[in-house]
Image (spheres, rainbow, N blue to C red):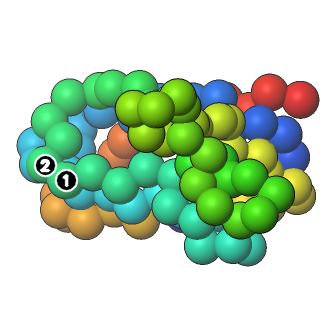
Amino acid sequence: MYSPFLSGRLAAIHYIKTDFADGVDFTITSEATGETLWTESDVNAAKVCRPRGATHSNAGVAALYASAGTAVNDLIRLGRDRIKIAIAAGGNAKNGAFHIVVED
């Protein structure tokens, strides 16, 4: 399924389990860029993911925090884009929901 067109900073995606089978697999991506927003396998309960993307310097190299080399992540921005949710192993004719939270 696809979300409506969204613009803003992606703050969170809530997976609401209703009668999906246990062990649901899903892949959530940006339609325009194909960027992975959340992918997970064998999910058995409702949960929230707050996706972040790696940041880079203006030289195109990964931005790292201090000498430890820990990646610096930031909110993912969407610009008139739709979010694609693909579900596998959710059970035949089952229901569930995803709530997408975007900051203006």
Looking at the image, residue 46 sits to the left or right of residue 70; the answer is left
- Residue 90 shows in the view: no
- 4 over 48 or under it: above or below: below
Tell which of 62 and 48 is nearer to you.
62
Looking at the image, residue 87 sits to the left or right of residue 55; the answer is left
- 79 over 49 or under it: above or below: below
Q: Which residue is mark 1?
A: 41
Label 2, residues with CA under 10 Å away: few <14, some 14-19, many ≥20: some
Tell which of 68 and 37 is nearer to you.
68
Q: Position of residue 103 (x, y in %)?
A: 80, 27
Q: Quadrant of residue 46?
A: top left
* Type of amino acid under label 1: Ser
Q: Position of residue 28 (x, y in %)?
A: 48, 57
Q: Residue at x 74, y 52 (%)?
A: 57
* Type of amino acid under label 2: Asp
Q: Which residue is mark 2?
A: 42
Q: Quadrant of residue 3?
A: bottom right
Q: Are marks 2 and 1 in contact (CB under 8 Å)?
A: yes
